[in-house]
Amino acid sequence: MYKTVLITGGSGFVGSNLAIYFKRDNPSCRVIALDNLKRRGSELNLPRLSAAGAEFIHGDIRNKEDIEAVGRFDLMIECSAEPSVLAGYNDSPEYLINTNLVGTVNCFEAARKCRADVIFLSSSRVYPIKEINAINFIDLETRFDLDSVQDIKGVSSEGISEGFPMGSVRSLYGATKLASELLLNEYIQMYGIRGVINRCGVLTGPWQMGKVDQGFVVLWIARHIYKGKLSYFGFGGNGKQVRDILHVSDLYDLLVRQIKDMNIHNGQTYNVGGARENSISLCELTEYCEKLTGNKIGIESVIEDRIADIPYYISDCSKVREATGWKPRISTSEIIREIADWINKNKEILRPILL
Ligand SMILES: NC(=O)c1ccc[n+]([C@@H]2O[C@H](COP(=O)([O-])OP(=O)(O)OC[C@H]3O[C@@H](n4cnc5c(N)ncnc54)[C@H](O)[C@@H]3O)[C@@H](O)[C@H]2O)c1
């Protein structure tokens, strides 16, 4: 059993929830959440971490001294990132690269020195945009779906698997994630540390500080609750783009399985998501939100495609399912209801962040 767990990005959405679950299930374990509080709203997670008995350290993974100051740890869950696929498009990519790549290497270095295990949260955005756009889709009433005929390797009725071609470009965000994956695999091979890579689809749940470029499920529900503004961007402008969504506690359940059998999962890369059963299009999400809140906000339609956007992504989780027996337990409708309850209970403190 681990004595000290370091969760980088530990006051972010994923990091704070994992820290709290981990401490709940392992009270004698020291759980440290390191974060530079760059993400607006991450500070709201500090009282939650403290109430759960997790320690917070204000630190920046771009400075290796900040990670070294933590001292020894035996498991690192690397959740710190600039998580937006749009990062770097209209301005400098420096913060993105220095955090998601250079900072991540600083994290791997610290893990090497402590001989700690590493769980790395990668992203489905490692798969290239042109190839995803070349998938054969059919246009249904409320969503795009996969055609039964596909010419691209790694696409099936289950979604996109780890065998998908990696050929062309994928956004700077996706590239920093893929480069970090490659480096972690080298660290595993060269230095004998143990590590697992999880390429996550959309993760969501309470305490996600949803914004236009990241965290769309929370953003959508919040804007319905507060009667704010929303737009359907691109792909015809009617909200048919589809993603699979996974509750962060289901992600935690998977990590528990991976940690328990680290020798089996060491060096593996898994696609992790809600899968086909838990997929939703934007206009289907609108319908849920309208029913739940009683509010119709009138969503603007923007015909032009947004940069780096894709019409469809569903994780084919067959590999991780076979390796661990894991599958998500929380359905799309339960996730949406839980998020709405959380926003309604914390309406005033969340308003400036989510509206
Ligand atoms: N949420 C998703 O849908 C999703 C999907 C796929 C992958 N991921 C990955 O999961 C991880 C967690 O994402 P999240 O949704 O919790 O995002 P988040 O923005 O809520 O959390 C990331 C945290 O990292 C912190 N951070 C940013 N730069 C830092 C730095 N230089 N040093 C220290 N801390 C820094 C932020 O303040 C924030 O609290 C990220 O690696 C992200 O790329 C998330």
Image (cartoon, helix red, strand yellow):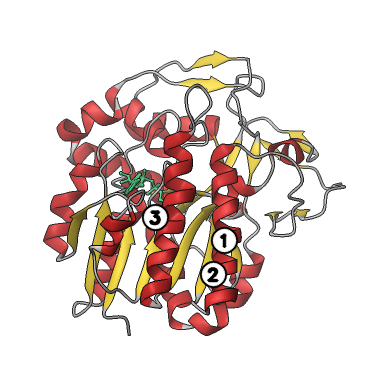
Badge 2: residue crowd in 10 Å (few <14, some 14–19, many ≥20): many
**Label 3: which residue?**
79
Dot 2: element: helix
In this orientation, which residue lies closer to the viewer: 265 or 335? 265
Where the N terminus falls, by quadrant?
Answer: bottom left
Q: Splitting the image into 4 quarters, where does residue 223 fall?
A: top left
How far is the residue under mark 2 from the one under mark 1? 6 Å
Q: Amino acid at mark 3?
A: Cys
Q: Nearer the viewer, mark 1 or mark 3?
A: 1
Residue 121 higher or lower than 185, as above or below: above
Residue 298 higher or lower than 281, as above or below: above
Q: Is residue 98 left or right of residue 351?
A: right
Dot 3: element: loop
Badge 3: residue crowd in 10 Å (few <14, some 14–19, many ≥20): many
Residue 301: image x %, image y %?
A: 55, 15
Where the C terminus falls, by quadrant?
Answer: top left
Residue 214 in view in this figure: no
Residue 84: image x %, image y %?
A: 47, 37
Q: Is mark 2 within 8 Å of ligand 1?
A: no
Q: Amino acid at mark 1?
A: Leu
Which residue sits at x=71%, y=40%? 145
How far is the residue under mark 1 from the one under mark 3? 16 Å
Badge 1: residue crowd in 10 Å (few <14, some 14–19, many ≥20): some
Residue 59 higher or lower than 2, as above or below: above
Q: Is mark 3 within 8 Å of ligand 1?
A: yes
**Label 2: which residue?**
187
Q: Is residue 150 left or right of residue 28?
A: right
**Label 1: which residue?**
183
Q: Which is nearer the N-term, disc 2 or disc 3?
A: 3
Dot 1: element: helix
Q: Amino acid at mark 2?
A: Tyr
How far is the residue under mark 2 from the one under mark 3? 18 Å
